Image (cartoon, rainbow, N blue to C red):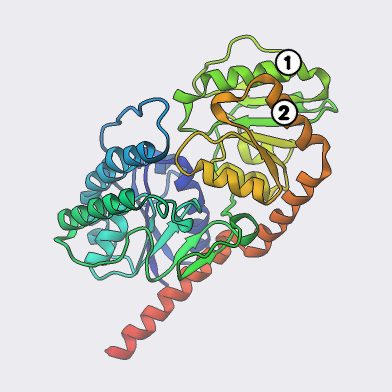
Amino acid sequence: MARFLFVVPPLVGHVNPATGVAGELAARGHEVAWAGHEELLRRLAGAQARVYPCAVPPETARPPGLKGPAALQFLWQDFLIPLADAMAPGVRAAIDAFEPDVVVADQQALAGGLIAEGRGLPWVTSATTSAELLDPLASMPKVASWVGELLAALRSRLVDGRGGADPRFSPHGVLAFTTRELLGPAAVPEPVWLVGPSITARPSTADFPWEWLDAPCPTVLVSLGTANTDAGAAFLTTVADAFAGLGDRARAVIADPGGVLGEVAPNVLVRPEVPQLPLLARVDAVLCHAGHNTVCETLWHGLPLVVAPIRDDQPIVAGQVVDAGAGLRLRFGRADATRITAAVDAVLTEPAYRLAAGKIAASFHAAGGSPAAAGHLEALAAQLSLRSAETE
């Protein structure tokens, strides 16, 4: 049996897919440990998980309205690079204590790949969003060069310049939680394993009134994810107004973690937290920010989407949804109640969107998800063990 160390950033959408893979490996008898934010990992990976804590940098407030190169600059300069520097001591300690055979490093936990490579350890990238696979900096060569300089400086600080692989793309393999049916035909770097979403039961403390769903009315789940509270107040208010106008034609369950909504119409249910996976089995469509996890979990259930991307990888994912025919896109800052109503009406009443979503769902289920990802990691560990035995 092998030992796998998962290195993850303090982001729910990046931890959740890894928990499914880690759980599958553990069920097969392998040893699994984590390096990351301890409190978050205890909540998502379970109280009994073996966790090696990593520090996180002080949060830097994102200026409102950042788009394009400015948003990318903020992501790298104010989040990814400081996070790597902060996590590095914890990652080193985890490797020293756990002695993994393989490190599984999230694309946004740059310290994982850099330190694993610097130590001569085999490592695999966990790509929880497909945006990086499509080279979003290809049209911005100056930004790409600047990112390269940041990574070179980070490599120098963390591992004295050892290694040369891009920490976002391990030469040993990249686990990509998507399929061609959503990703589209664009070329991706090798070796990339398209395993589909990692969907697994996860703990939830959400208290949800399930009886509210019993009435025979199409239901739409509305969510902007866990990291967009600052940007979502006006949008969620407009969404609530739009559903008020829909009356008995549709109702909404709105996730409102920031508590920005006041009184709403009877066909709108507002909750600070929702049990998303069980809820997706009971709703008819989803209106969201085009976060990769929410999109994939929605499509796993064969549901159509209305997507209103805010920033980062979300416009790319939204484009994939629209190109696949599985939903409609709104402009986040300009979506008024009329536009929201029209989009929701369309995905609920026009069969083409649900048919396209069903096609993607079939590809997701066929790809294998967590078991397929665990299989790739097992095969790599076995191959490396065999090579090691042959050289002894």
- Can you say which quadrant of the picture contains the C terminus? bottom left
> Where on the picture, by quarter, is residue 308?
top right
Q: Position of residue 272 (x, y in %)?
A: 55, 23
Q: Mark 2 is on which residue type?
A: Trp
Q: Hey, what amino acid is under mark 1? A: Ala
Instruction: Say which quarter of the image contains residue 101.
Output: bottom left
| Count of picture labels | 2
Residue 281 drawn at (x, y percent): 72, 41
User: Is 62 left or right of 200, judged from the image as shown?
Assistant: left
Q: Horizontal and vertical percent for residue 249? A: 82, 24
Q: In the rendered view, would you say 392 is above or below 329?
A: below
Q: Extreme right residue here?
A: 216
Rendered location of residue 125, percent (x, y): 41, 61
Q: Which mark is residue 244?
A: 1
Mark 1 crowd level (few <14, some 14–19, many ≥20, 10 Å Cα): many
Q: What's the residue at 23%, 53% (across, down)?
A: 149
* In the rendered image, the vertical position of residue 309 relative to residue 319, given as above or below: above
Say which of 224 and 375 sits in front: 224
**Quadrant in which the N terminus appears:** bottom left
Among the two numbered marks 1 and 2 on one chain, the one whose residue lies closer to the N terminus: 2
SS category of the residue bearing label 1: helix
Q: Front-most of 319 and 198?
A: 319
Classed neighbour count for the residue bearing mark 2: other residues with Cα under 10 Å, few (<14), some (14–19), many (≥20): few
Task: Name the residue: 59% across, 10% down.
Answer: 262
Secondary structure of the residue carrying tag 2 is helix
Residue 201, visible in the rendered structure: no
Tell me the residue that label 2 is attached to. Answer: 210
Looking at the image, can residue 238 be seen?
A: yes
Question: Camera-side residue: 35 or 318?
Answer: 318
Badge nearest the viewer, 1 or 2: 1
Name which residue lies at 32% across and 83% down: 388
